[in-house]
Amino acid sequence: MKLGKLILAASLALGGATVAQAADTASTISGSTALALAGVVAPLSPILASGEKKAIAMLFAANSDIPYKKPIAVTADRIVCRTGNVDITVRNCEVTFGKKVKTVNGSTANEIYATEALAGVPADGAAGSNFESLSKLSCTIDPNAIRQKDGSGASCTFQPGN
């Protein structure tokens, strides 16, 4: 029953987006939150083709009438973000794609950190820092479904960070 209340509270807090999460298990999100998570990760991906990145950017910028038609998979092996609560200028994320690690700072890191929070990734604290991390991110973005404007077409799964 506790998990059901957590899911309902998270769904209400996310404006109706679907969130399912339990400790140490996979989480699933869909709708606008899934599109947002894919939207902040896709530009960093060395795996996606430029056309796929452009399509995700257009969808994330409220343009559902795009020429790209195929579903797009946005994946990352691990995302670890850190903000400072003593040194409040600290904002960074390491996003791992296979053996490649992209480090971002400032506003880009803040966007990823905030989107992880929106997706239900719990924050963890350590001396002077707040951390959010996830692993095994797998998002599917279907431009054809999104074009229908019925809330479908974006879903993601991920594991708690490690």
Image (spheres, rainbow, N blue to C red):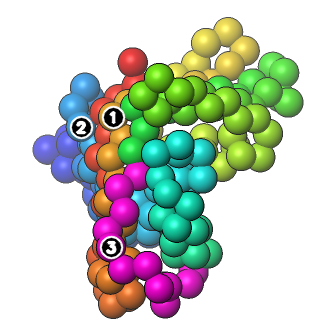
* Alpha carbon distance from label 2 to label 3: 26 Å
The number of callouts visible is 3
Dot 2 alpha-carbon crowd within 10 angstroms: few under 14, some 14 to 19, many 20 or more: some
| Secondary element at tag 3 | loop
Q: Position of residue 20 (x, y in %)?
A: 25, 49
Identify the image quadrant of residue 58.
Answer: bottom right
The mark that comes first in sequence, 2 or 3, is 2
Which residue appears at 61% of the width and 12% of the height? 126
| Secondary element at tag 2 | loop
Q: Is residue 155 left or right of residue 13?
A: left
Q: Amino acid at mark 2?
A: Ala
Q: Is residue 70 magenta?
A: yes
Residue where numbered disc 3 is placed? 70
Q: Which mark is residue 136?
A: 1
Above or below, 101 against 9 in this view is above
The mark that comes first in sequence, 1 or 3, is 3
Q: Assign the N terminus to one quadrant of the image.
A: top left
Asked whether the beta carbons under mark 1 and mark 2 sit within 8 Å of each other, the answer is yes
Residue where numbered disc 2 is placed? 26
Extent of the magenta region: 62-74
Residue 117 visible somewhere in the drawing? no
Q: Amino acid at mark 1?
A: Lys
